[in-house]
Image (cartoon, rainbow, N blue to C red):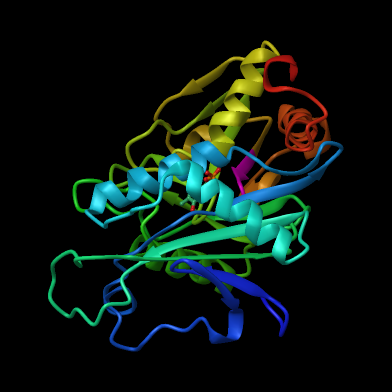
Amino acid sequence: MYFDDNTLVYLDGEFVPAAQATCGVYAQSLHYGYAVFEGIRAYNTAQGTRIFKAREHYERLHYSCQSIGLPLTYSVEELTEISYQLLAKNNLTDAYLRPLVFAATPHMTLTAPPASNLMLAAWHWGKYLGSQSLRLTVSPYERPNPKAVPIEAKVSGHYANSIIASSEAKGRGFDEALLLDMNGYVAEGPGANFFVEKDGALFTAPGGSILRGITRNTVIDLARSAGITVTERFFRPDELRGATGAFMTGTAAEVVGVASVDDVVFATPFEHTLGAQLAARYTALVLGETAAAEAS
Ligand code: PMP
């Protein structure tokens, strides 16, 4: 699914066949999750292949590396250029891009490695959470305590929490988990942010215990430019009662409706919510059919 015999990945300065791009079992990142990554999408637009918000994603990659002290020697511009080359070499237009900064060095000591490695892969990926409205459940697992790890950085090791929560929710027959923060406020999904519509306005968790998604920021901008009030504030699951609807946002998931959270079932079909309007605006924006400023 991710690669075939013809796929090339970028690894430390060259494009190599995916099957040959391997990493040793003593790699520090493999043992401790001490690595950083991004999830980016490219779209086939009327103006050609366009990577959506490449700068924001690569600035976040730099921020994530700095947050954990992992060296990254490539500039935002170089990373963007490599990304376009990778797409062209693999004849990809609509694609998901996965840059990974990691330590292949055999380094079992619990200190930052002297150098890092860079891998970039791309593949076709449909909407990560599908197109149907999701049945969520509040997870028994919380988001990691932001005083324990820099939770606003996209660190590989944080995703053990995501995998555990998502698997647990699916094991109970739900589509996805909804995680609370350490104070019992709704934070986000394992790989997507969460918005609620109530009384004609939207609210979503503030920064602190979430990854402040680039899609989240884009959707906030789209909503505000359409005159919709968006508040970033703490809220508990019981505030979902009486809400009109909810949706999740993420680069991989894009904008996807939420049908229910445990026994709270949203009465309004997603198609009739602000989330659906914003999903359409988001699609128009990523396809270059509207510029950010005129997306309203
Ligand atoms: N939260 C988490 C935990 C994620 O992994 C992601 C996906 N990167 C998001 C939110 C959404 O972020 P973005 O919109 O930047 O993809």
Q: Between residue 41 and residue 208, name the one nearer to us.
A: 41
Please say whether residue 252 is visible from this viewpoint: no
Which residue is painted at 79% across and 24% down in the image? 290
Vertical arrangement, residue 262 with respect to residue 102, above or below = above
User: 186 or 291: nearer the eye?
Assistant: 291
> What residue lies at 40% left-to-right and 51% top-to-bottom?
74
Residue sticking out furthest to the right: 46
Please provide percent x and percent y for residue 122: 64, 64
Q: Is residue 286 magenta?
A: no
- In this picture, residue 253 sits left or right of residue 164: right
Q: Residue placed farthest to the top in the image?
A: 227
The answer to whether any part of residue 89 appears in the image is yes
Magenta part mainly helix, strand or loop? strand
Q: Which residues are magenta?
A: 247-251
Expressed as whole percent of the image width and height from the top left, the position of residue 185 reads: 38, 39
Q: Quadrant of residue 212?
A: top left
What residue is rendered at 68% in x and 22% in y?
292
Residue 248 is situated, as x and y percent measured from the top left of the image, at: 61, 43
Image position of 167 (left or right of 130): left
